[in-house]
Amino acid sequence: MKRSFSFLLFGLMLLLAASCSTDYAKILKSKDNEYKLSKANQFYESGVKYSQAGDRIKANRNLNHAHELYDELLKTFLKGTPRYEEHFFKFAMASYLLKDYVEAEMTFKAYMDNFPTGSHIEEAYFLRGKSLAKASPRAELDQANTMKAISLLQAYLATFPNGANAKEGAEILRGLQKKLEEKHYLAAKLYFDREQYLAAQVTFNSLIERFPESERGDEYAYKETLSSYLYAKNSYLHLQEARYTKALENVQYFKTGYPNSKYAKEVIDIENKINQEVKALKLQQTQSLVNNI
C-alpha cells in the first residue's frame, strides 16, 4: 500500500512538473510583452521568497524563468523606457541569487555603467564586489577574483563610507585579505619545506611588508630569520660569513619588533648558533693563514 502511494505521489509530481513546463513554454511563445513582463516579475518575486526560505529547487526554477524573460525583454521591449533600469537590476539580482557570481558581477558592472546615478547604484557597487568575493576560490588556488574583489570593495568603501552595506563590505574585505595572506604564506612555507631557503626568506619578508598589521607578523619574522640562517648554513664556506651577517640583521629586526613573541627563545637560539658558527669560521680562517705561512 505504501509503495502504491509512493508511485502515485511520484506520478503526480511528474504531471505537475510537465504542466509547469508547458505553461512556461506558452509564456515564452506569447507575443504579449506586458504579459511576459508580469510573469517575469512574478517568477522573480517567487524566486526571492523561495531563496530566503532556503528552498533552492523552487528558487532556482523561478529565478531561471525570470532571468530568461528579463534577458529577452531588456533587449527589446524595455530598452529605453523608464522601466529599463529597475528590471536591469532585477536581471542582475537573478544571476546573483542563482549563485552565478561571475555573470552577476558583469551584470552589476553593466548596471553601473548604464545608470551611474541609478537608484540601486550603491547596492550594485557593493554586490559587484561581493559577487567576486563569493567566486573567490580556496587560498591555494589562483586568487585573481580575490584581488579584483578586494579592489572593488575598497573602492566601494571609499565611495560609500557610510553606506548601508559598508559594515558587511568591510568584513568581507578583511576575510579576503586574510585569504590573500594565507596564499602568500603557503607559498613561503612551500619554499621552506623544499629547502629553498633564499626564496622562503624573500617570501616571508614580503608577507611582513604586504601585511604589516597581521597578527602573525612575529611568526613571519621568525621564519624569515630561520630561513636566512639555514640559507647561510647551507652555503659554500666562502659565502657563509656574509650571509650569517644578513641573518643577524634579521635577528635584530625580530628582537626589536617582537620582544614579547612566543618565538623569542627560538630566535635567541638562532643568534647563538650564528655567533658560534661565525666564530668557528674565523678560527678556521686564522688556522688556514697560519698553515700557509
Image: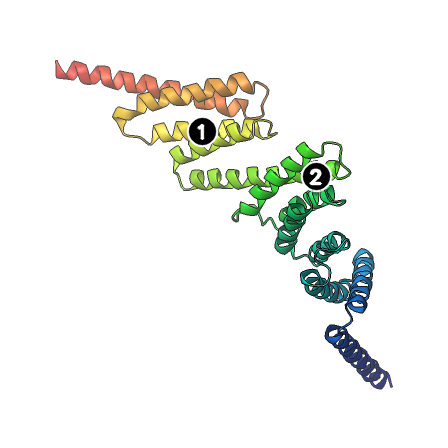
Residue toward you, 54 or 22: 22
Q: Is residue 230 left or right of residue 219?
A: left
Q: Is residue 147 visible?
A: yes
Residue toward you, 207 or 150: 150
Q: Position of residue 28 (x, y in %)?
A: 73, 73
Q: Position of residue 139 (x, y in %)?
A: 56, 45
Residue identified by numbered label 1 = 226
Q: Is residue 134 visible?
A: no
Q: Is residue 238 left or right of residue 41?
A: left
Mark 1, secondary structure of its residue: helix
Residue identified by numbered label 2 = 169
Give above or below for 245 relative to 207: above
Q: Position of residue 118 (x, y in %)?
A: 73, 44
- Residue at image x 82%, y 65%? 38
Give above or below for 265 relative to 85: above
Mark 2, secondary structure of its residue: helix
Q: Position of residue 236 (x, y in %)?
A: 27, 29
Give above or below for 225 relative to 76: above
Q: Quadrant of the C terminus?
A: top left
Residue toward you, 277 or 155: 155
The kind of residue on which mark 2 rests is: Gly
The kind of residue on which mark 1 rests is: Leu
